[in-house]
Image (cartoon, rainbow, N blue to C red):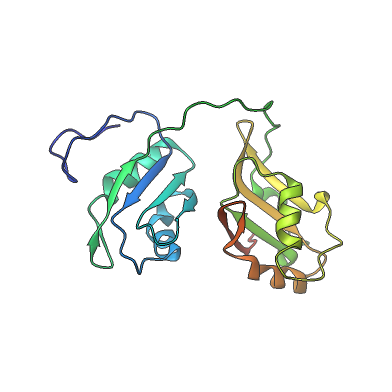
Amino acid sequence: MSRPKGSRGGGRQEVVTESDTCFVGNLDPTVEEEDLEEMFDEYDYSEIRMPPGKGFAFVSFEANEAAHKAMTELNGKELKGKALRVNLAKPKAPREEGPPLEDTAGLSTFVTEENVDRAIKLRGLPFRTTPADVLKFVKENGIEGFDYLTEKDVIMEVKEGKISGFGLVIFKDEEDAEKALDLDHKEIGTRWVGVSAAEMR
């Protein structure tokens, strides 16, 4: 979906037919990632990348349609006194990838009455993240006591052969899961990862 000339935002728009990511520009310097999380929450976003001090961000979604809807409804909307510029980002050029992964069930199917109090949910994982990367993230961010975790304690959601950006870590007890919430907005690579308590649905 592309916007016709003369639509809100002005200027000539390059037609982008397939993109699951929006470029969000003209951000006020006081805008934080939490502000964008709140604004884009209803659009089923999977990841927000906001370089510090740059005045822009990239928001990725679970589907192209969600990106299109967010662009249409949020372009020109004010956030902290400034009108946002929301456009579809140009799709990245195809790159060589490994063999497809085996799809998993949705994460909610792995959260049970037995483990819900000792599980955390990860959001915004880079799409090439491995269970080993998650273990490194959990164990090497200044919180002690997680050495017992193994790859069996990590669940990565896979859709259409690719990591979806979501995952779970199951701890031995509720106390450790609560400590792990301090990992929220720590980085894997160059991306901040959202960490929250797991919930049953």
Regarding residue 5, the answer to whether it shows in the image is yes
Q: Residue at x 83, y 58 (%)?
A: 149
| Quadrant in which the C terminus appears | bottom right
**Taking 171 as reference, is 155 above or below it?**
above
Exactly how many numbered labels are in the figure? 0
> Which quadrant holds residue 38?
bottom left
* x then y, percent, for residue 128: 64, 40
Left or right: where 19 falls relative to 196: left
**Taking 145 as reference, is 2 above or below it?**
above
* x then y, percent, for residue 2: 27, 32
**Taking 93 as reference, is 67 above or below it?**
below
Q: Residue at x 16, y 39 (%)?
A: 11
Residue furthest to the right in view is: 148
> Which quadrant holds residue 13?
top left
Q: Residue at x 28, y 68 (%)?
A: 80
| Quadrant in which the N terminus appears | top left
Q: Residue at x 72, y 70 (%)?
A: 142
User: Camera-side residue: 192 or 171?
Assistant: 192
Residue furthest to the front in view is: 53
User: Camera-side residue: 77 or 9?
Assistant: 9
**Taking 175 as reference, is 79 above or below it?**
above
Residue furthest to the left in view is: 6
* x then y, percent, for residue 63: 46, 38
* x then y, percent, for residue 143: 74, 70
Left or right: where 158 falls relative to 79: right
